[in-house]
Image: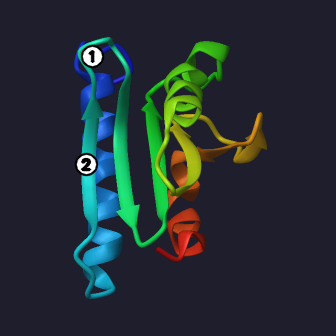
Amino acid sequence: MRYHPLRGAIFESWVSTEILKHYTNQGKTPSLYHYRESRGLEIDILIEAADTLQLVEVKSGSTIIPSFFKNLKRFSQNSKENFKIQSSLVYAGEESYKQAGIQLISWRELPTELERWNM
């Protein structure tokens, strides 16, 4: 899988499925969306709950590069809604930590992190 041309799409599908599975196991029906504008802004997974929008960007790379944050920052800056915005980036690396106000989540720690979202 490391060099497969669909690696990114498969990884994104896996993350989406894990999120859906988490909510389903709690008896909840989540409001999950994929967000895309004609101007190029795209958010892989957007979860809407009460007064919070959870933005999730998914990257199959194991090394973080600055461009990974571009769409999360653009969406947050352009948002005129009265929502609290939480941004996360799930990636194929080994460490979870916070950088530039965005929670980076190792694929290994995704289930644990989902428990913390309380959405």
Residue 94 percent coordinates (x, y): 65, 41
**Residue 102 x %, y %:** 67, 41
Give the residue at mark 2: 33
The number of numbered badges drawn on the structure is: 2
Q: Which residue is mark 1?
A: 4
How far is the residue under mark 1 from the one under mark 2? 26 Å
Amino acid beneath label 1: His
- In the picture as drawn, the residue positioned furthest to the bottom comes out as 27
* Residue shown at the point (59%, 28%) measured from the top left: 73
Q: Residue at x 53, y 77 (%)?
A: 118
**Which corner quadrant of the image does residue 101 belong to?**
top right
Left or right: 75 in relation to 11: right
Q: In the structure shown, which secondary structural element does the residue marked by tag 2 occupy? A: strand
Amino acid type, residue under disc 2 in the picture: Tyr
Q: Nearer the viewer, residue 63 or 49?
A: 49
Which label sits on residue 50?
none
Looking at the picture, how far across and down is residue 100, in whole percent? Answer: 77, 34
Label 1: few (<14), some or many (≥20) within 10 Å?
few
Q: Relative to 83, is 16 on the left or the right?
A: left
Report the front residue among 23 and 38.
38
Left or right side of 51 for 103: right
Which quadrant of the structure image shows residue 87?
top right
